[in-house]
Image (cartoon, helix red, strand yellow):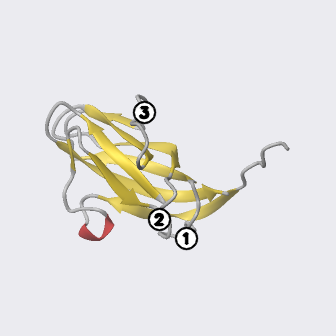
Amino acid sequence: GAPRALRFHGLTPCRVVDTRSASLGGPAPLAAGISRPFPISGACGVPAGVTVVSANVTVTQATAAGSVVVHANGTTVPITPQVAFGAGRTRANNAILALDGAGLVSARAEIASGAVHLIVDGNGYFD
């Protein structure tokens, strides 16, 4: 049969990742070239089992110019980033993020050296 269309469920925007905060995946920033997993399902009204979420992805306090890629944990790092940034800049972008079966995303800082903080505010999910 034909694939079933996904339905969007809006949520009040809610912080699910903030590497500046020990309770939301920090307090360490993303280090250059290292992928880190972050839980999304179960936070801020995102149900377990959801595999696609809508979010605002923000980077801040970058020590060098680069980009951040957010993707389903355990998958190949895509070549298209969610956010590109300059040193010391704060930048944000809306994104549709895939989650793995356990509800995790993985984030990677594509910078030559240094680090950047990541903030993800969920605002909906698809099922």
Which residue is pictured at 32% across the width and 59% down the height? Answer: 18
Q: Is residue 1 left or right of residue 51?
A: right
Q: Secondary structure at mark 2?
A: strand
Which residue is pictured at 20% across the width and 39% down the height? Answer: 32
| Residue denoted by label 3 | 78
Residue 115 screen position, x and y as percent: 18, 43
Q: Is residue 81 left or right of residue 99?
A: left
For residue 121, what is the image quadrant?
A: bottom left
Q: Is residue 25 left or right of residue 39?
A: left
Q: Are marks 2 and 3 in contact (CB under 8 Å)?
A: no
**Circle nearer the viewer, 1 or 2:** 1
| Residue denoted by label 2 | 14
| Residue denoted by label 1 | 45
Amino acid residing under circle 2: Cys
Which residue is pictured at 57% across the width and 68% down the height? Answer: 47
Q: Are marks 1 and 3 in contact (CB under 8 Å)?
A: no
> For this rendering, which residue is in front, 124 or 60?
124
Q: Are marks 1 and 2 in contact (CB under 8 Å)?
A: yes
**Circle nearer the viewer, 1 or 3:** 3
Which residue is pictured at 50% across the width and 70% down the height? Answer: 42
Amino acid residing under circle 1: Gly
* Mark 1 vs mark 2, CA separation in Å: 9 Å
* Mark 2 vs mark 3, CA separation in Å: 25 Å
Q: Quadrant of the N terminus?
A: top right
For residue 126, what is the image quadrant?
A: bottom right
The crowding category of the residue bearing disc 1, from other C-alpha atoms within 10 Å (few below 14, some 14 to 19, many at least 20), is: some
The mark nearer the N terminus, 1 or 3, is 1
**Circle nearer the viewer, 2 or 3:** 3
Amino acid residing under circle 3: Pro
Residue 87 screen position, x and y as percent: 20, 35
Residue 86 screen position, x and y as percent: 25, 32
Q: Secondary structure at mark 3?
A: loop
